Image: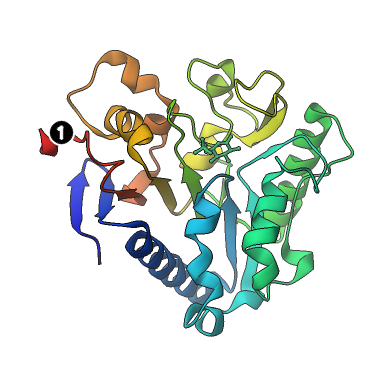
């Protein structure tokens, strides 16, 4: 149960007193979406991010979720990935494998990580090709309003500069419209090269959950969510996450929520 739930335009904001409660709420929501998607489509296609969201999802590998979720129907993807070897400390695949996936009975053939032997450009094209094949067989659904894939759930974490996935503030990658997966070679944090889903793909997802915790993210959260912000906030990547139908839910702890307007 969230400490406080705010309904803002096209999004729900769930604020928790501590990380334990946030983790439980996150796991409950993911379980609900998994059940709904498996009931409607027979599968659940989820795209993960890197960062602390992975450890916040750890409840999924514990009771009751480990037994109640139908893991055999899950398909795993990455919203973004650093172009490094899969065993590199900065690999988002490695992070998820070590702290989550290795503890869940998900079929290895359902885990779609990037090909780490390719250049950034090749890896982005190759990943898009994989996704296109899985859209054809409807393992990944397709949007009703454009030709984008419609992931059942995309999980994002906001960084203190307001980036999500590898969509960084003021970066030309934000303009990419005609590709599903693209690449950058100049990320302002390690590693410089990464591949990332584009904004149209993220905004076409059936559900998007965004997580932010800690005081250092409070300003980015305020800029991404509140209405009383300047024009520069309109182009903050985290604010540009606007899936249709109010299927966007933010999960915050009290520190990350501390600059939201209602506190002032
Ligand atoms: O670079 C990345 O950062 C974000 C989260 O940022 P953090 O500063 O909170 O770790 C993450 O969601 C993304 O997947 C990752 O590649």
Q: Nearer the viewer, residue 190 or 231?
A: 190
Classify the position of the N terminus by image quarter: bottom left
Which residue corresponds to the image point at 22% horizontal and 40% vertical from the top-left?
9
Q: Position of 141 compared to 243: left or right?
A: right
Residue 89: x and y in percent read 73, 43
| 201 over 64 or under it: above or below | above
| 229 over 238 or under it: above or below | above
Q: Position of 220 compared to 188: left or right?
A: left
Residue 228 sits in quarter: top left
| 138 over 133 or under it: above or below | below
Residue 231: x and y in percent read 29, 14
Crowding at label 1, few (<14), some or many (≥20) Cα neighbours within 10 Å? few
Residue 131: x and y in percent read 71, 49
Which residue corresponds to the image point at 83% horizontal and 32% vertical from the top-left?
122
For disc 1, the marked residue is 261
Ligand 1 falls in which quarter? top right
Which residue corresponds to the image point at 45% horizontal and 71% vertical from the top-left?
31
Task: Tell me, yes or no, if residue 152 can be seen here.
Answer: no
């Amino acid at each position: 149960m969230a400490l406080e739930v705010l309904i803002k335009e096209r999004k729900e904001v769930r604020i928790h007193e501590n990380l334990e409660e946030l983790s439980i709420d996150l796991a409950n929501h993911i379980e609900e979406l998994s059940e709904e998607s498996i009931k409607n489509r027979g599968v659940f296609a989820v795209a993960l991010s890197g960062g602390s969201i992975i450890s916040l999802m750890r409840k999924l590998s514990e009771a009751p979720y480990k037994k109640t979720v139908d893991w055999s129907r899950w398909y795993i993807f990455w919203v973004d990935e650093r172009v490094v070897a899969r065993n590199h400390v900065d690999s988002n695949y490695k992070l998820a494998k070590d702290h989550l996936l290795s503890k869940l009975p998900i079929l290895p053939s359902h885990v779609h990580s990037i090909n780490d032997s390719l250049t950034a450009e090749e890896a982005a094209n190759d990943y898009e090709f994989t996704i296109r094949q899985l859209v054809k067989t409807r393992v990944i659904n397709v949007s009703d309003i454009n030709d984008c894939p419609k992931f059942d759930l995309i999980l994002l974490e906001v960084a203190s500069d307001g980036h999500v996935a590898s969509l960084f503030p003021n970066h030309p990658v934000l303009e990419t419209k005609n590709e599903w997966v693209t690449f950058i070679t100049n990320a302002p944090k390690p590693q410089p090269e990464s591949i990332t889903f584009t904004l149209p793909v993220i905004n076409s997802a059936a559900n998007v959950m965004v997580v932010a915790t800690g005081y250092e993210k409070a300003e980015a959260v305020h800029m991404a969510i509140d209405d009383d912000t300047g024009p520069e906030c309109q182009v903050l990547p985290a604010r540009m996450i606007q899936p249709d139908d109010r299927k966007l839910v933010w999960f915050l702890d009290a520190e990350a929520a501390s600059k939201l307007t209602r506190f002032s």
